[in-house]
Image (cartoon, helix red, strand yellow):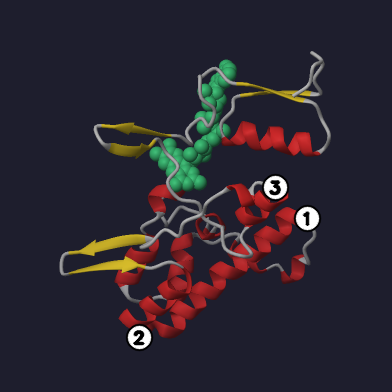
Amino acid sequence: MSNSNQYDAIVIGAGLGGLSTALHLAKKSMNVLVLEKQPKVGGYAQNYHRAGFDFDVSLHVLSAMNETGGLRHLFEYMQVLDKLEVTEYAPMWTSVFPDATYRLPPREAGHEYLKMLFPHESAGIDRYVSSIRAIIEANTRLYWSGEVDINNFFPERYFKKTYHQLLKDCFTDKRLFGIMGQLWQSTGLPNEKCAANWAAE
Ligand SMILES: Cc1cc2nc3c(=O)[nH]c(=O)nc-3n(C[C@H](O)[C@H](O)[C@H](O)COP(=O)(O)OP(=O)(O)OC[C@H]3O[C@@H](n4cnc5c(N)ncnc54)[C@H](O)[C@@H]3O)c2cc1C
């Protein structure tokens, strides 16, 4: 906060986008003013209490918070990681079929859980997990350093592929398409139309 009315930048809106932008600029020693029309900051990232229940307005889960994850990196850079209490979200998601319900645990446990359920797809599950990891790690490197060896840039393999094609590269069992494909409502496009890199992220 400055006493002067002179600002290097004015950010309109104190949602996650505006607050992140303001923090980035402030870290570059810029004098920033954030304007918000609502009485509370946070934009969509808020919750409220009604009739004994807590409701998320939108944000309910953060991905890329693992040790190499882009979001963790960003929070560290912004020096806010130690101010956050991060709780693991388990199960990550639930798939209900007419004859069975699958609750996928997070991270390595999820990997092992899938292999236990679908032993005949074990190699494909390993391939899927290593592909997703490689895409995320390469995208994170690209984002933070801007330097990539384009000839060895793993996600390039998936630049022109859809997420459905990635699933087809790894699985034959239709249930795995359902379990690993159900997040399409978050990516905003059906898997047949969604870029593999985006869905992987
Ligand atoms: C249902 C739903 C679920 C979601 N779930 C997740 C999730 O699980 N994980 C995840 O990472 N993301 C999730 N998202 C996405 C995430 O919530 C949003 O991407 C993010 O909060 C958007 O931030 P923003 O700053 O771009 O916009 P907003 O949060 O919309 O913030 C914009 C701010 O600008 C203010 N503003 C607008 N106009 C003016 C003006 N003229 N003057 C002053 N202030 C103004 C608004 O009041 C608001 O505070 C979800 C979104 C939805 C809708």
Q: Kindly report which numbered mark, 3 or 1, lies closer to the viewer in this rendering.
A: 3
Task: Read off the residue under disc 1.
Answer: 146
Question: Does dot 3 land on a helix, a strand or a loop?
Answer: loop
| Residue 134 image point, x, y percent | 61, 69
Q: Nearer the viewer, residue 33 or 179?
A: 33
Q: Earlier in the sequence, mark 1 or mark 2?
A: 2
Q: Residues within 10 Å of mark 2 (few under 14, many from 20)?
A: few
| Residue 194 image point, x, y percent | 48, 53
What's the amino acid at mark 3? Gln
The extreme top residue here reads 5
| Residue 17 image point, x, y percent | 61, 35
Give the number of the disc on residue 119.
2
Quick one: quadrant of the N terminus?
top right
Q: State the separation of the CA atoms marked 1 and 2.
A: 39 Å
Q: Earlier in the sequence, mark 3 or mark 1?
A: 3
Quick one: quadrant of the C terminus?
bottom right
Q: State the separation of the CA atoms marked 3 and 1.
A: 21 Å
What's the amino acid at mark 2? Pro
Q: Nearer the viewer, residue 56 or 158?
A: 56
| Residue 19 image point, x, y percent | 63, 33
Task: Kindly identify the residue that appears in the image at 35 percent across and 86 percent down.
Answer: 120
Q: Residues within 10 Å of mark 3 (few under 14, many from 20)?
A: few
Number of marks present in the image shown: 3
Task: Kindly identify the residue that appears in the image at 55 percent across and 75 percent down.
Answer: 130
